[in-house]
Amino acid sequence: MSRAHLAGAALILLATAGCLRGSPSSKPPIHPNPSMDDQPKLLAQDESKFFYDGSGMRPPVPGTIARGELRQDPVFFEGKGPDGKFVAVSPVPAGDAVLERGRQRYTIYCQPCHDPRGGGTGILFQRGKVPTTAVHDPKIVAYPDGQIFDVITNGTGLMPSYKWPIPPQDRWAIVAYVRELQKRHQAMTADAGAAAK
């Protein structure tokens, strides 16, 4: 090949390279070797013409259980025994660490309605007159531990469910702390009665 041909080929190559870089165009760029980012794919919330229901996201196989969500112990996860009745005593022993954890969770989730001593005159009652049951109400004191756990889990009346923000271990810790508040209230009532006599 002559020098003229080589120089011409180099000039054409240079001109072509200059045109491919930075020239404005309304057409999408040509990718001779597309990357993984630009592959055709179906995103989770996209529609799909492949499936009959038109949904790209597929439902889980029936009976699928998420990792860490196998709940084989109904006493721990529901507060109910094998007979379906509420358990009388918490399956979590109420040691100092559990009571402290219960106090912390009670302060975060329960205190706005039930107040620090469980009297039912929290900030929502003070400002919004939201009627709230006192945790030392004789009806609540008579509840078995499993029923208090169930109320925290599923809510009742105006009280919402705390199933999702509070894990079961912490719900049992709150039950232990509520029992502690009830004992304190009974002791204060007994002391007040003795002082009045």
Image (cartoon, rainbow, N blue to C red):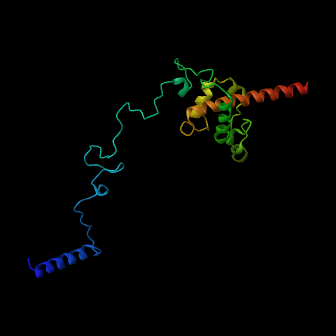
Q: Position of residue 96 (x, y in %)?
A: 69, 30
In the image, what residue occupies the spot 41% across and 32% down? 65
Expressed as whole percent of the image width and height from the top left, the position of residue 125 reads: 71, 43
- Res 103 → quadrant: top right
| Residue in view at x 32 percent, y 47 percent | 56
Which residue corresponds to the image point at 57% horizontal and 37% vertical from the top-left? 166
Q: Residue furthest left?
A: 1
Q: Looking at the image, can residue 136 be seen? A: no
The answer to whether residue 197 is left or right of residue 34 is right
Quadrant (top left/top right/bottom left/bottom right) for the N terminus: bottom left
Q: In the figure, is residue 148 to the left or right of 40?
A: right
Can you see residue 41?
Answer: yes
Compare residues 136 and 8 and report the one nearer the observer: 8
Quarter location, residue 64: top left
Observer-nearest of 16 and 29 = 16
Position of 13 relative to 41 (above/below): below
Furthest residue toward right: 197
Please identify the quadrant where the C terminus is shown.
top right
In this rendered view, identify the residue nearer to me: 78 or 125.
78
Residue 40: x, y in percent? 27, 54
173 left or right, relative to 36: right
Q: Is residue 20 above or below residue 113?
A: below
Q: Residue drawn 71% across and 37% down?
A: 120
